[in-house]
Amino acid sequence: MLLSLVASFSFAQNSDELSFKKLSQKFMKVDEGHQITLSYNFTYTGKSNLKITPPKVDCSCTEVVLPENDILPNSTNTIKIKFDTSDKIGWQERDVTLHFTSDAMDSQSIEKKITFKGMVKASKARKAAYKANKKKR
């Protein structure tokens, strides 16, 4: 029994085995209506394959593109974030919460939060509509 307890600890993953090059990124000022794509590279140095559960996002304007296969030990992978700036004006900051699991983790997970932020300028059409609406008052 002691041997199985020690074995379970030796195969458990920890967050130190999963490192992101950057957890937060800032995008350049863009006009409303553009689609922003950001890449988050990470390295996994654990001993067993990891899976990523469906991520938690702040709004439907954010799409997360995960690696197609399991995360293999001693590998580098990329998660892509696609942010649709339609109907988004001003300072934008979004979090994406990721949970990594494996069969060796006994229903525990490694949680990582990645963030992106930046400024979205109003489109010419929105500015014109705002001015027209302001004149009506």
Image: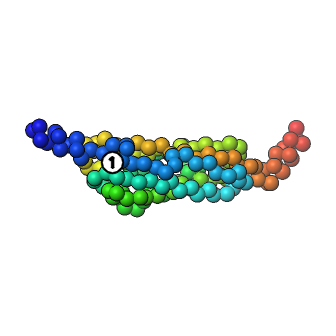
Q: Nearer the viewer, residue 29 or 68?
A: 29
- The answer to whether 85 appears left or right of 51 in the picture is right
What amino acid is at disc 1? Answer: Thr
Give the answer, above or below, for where 27 lies relative to 69. Answer: above
- The answer to whether 87 appears left or right of 54 in the picture is right
* Count of marks, rendered view: 1
Identified at 69% across, 56% down, the residue is: 33
Percent coordinates x, y for residue 32 in the rendering: 71, 53
Kind of element beneath mark 1: strand
Percent coordinates x, y for residue 8 in the rendering: 20, 43
Q: From this viewpoint, which residue is outermost toward the left?
A: 1
Give the position of the N terminus as an image quadrant: top left
Percent coordinates x, y for residue 42 in the rendering: 44, 53
Give the position of the C terminus as an image quadrant: top right
Q: Nearer the viewer, residue 36 or 3?
A: 3
Task: Kindly tell me whether residue 59 is visible in this rendering.
Answer: no
Quadrant of residue 81 in the image?
bottom right
Q: Nearer the viewer, residue 18 or 82?
A: 18
- The answer to whether 88 appears left or right of 83 in the picture is right
Crowd around label 1: few <14 · some 14–19 · many ≥20 (10 Å): many
- Residue that numbered label 1 is attached to: 101
Identified at 63% across, 57% down, the residue is: 35
The image's colour scheme reads rainbow
- The answer to whether 50 appears left or right of 21 in the picture is left
Quadrant of residue 68 in the image?
bottom left
Identified at 17% across, 44% down, the residue is: 7
Task: Kindly tell me whether residue 2 is visible in this rendering.
Answer: yes
Q: From this viewpoint, which residue is outermost toward the right?
A: 135
Percent coordinates x, y for residue 134 in the rendering: 86, 41
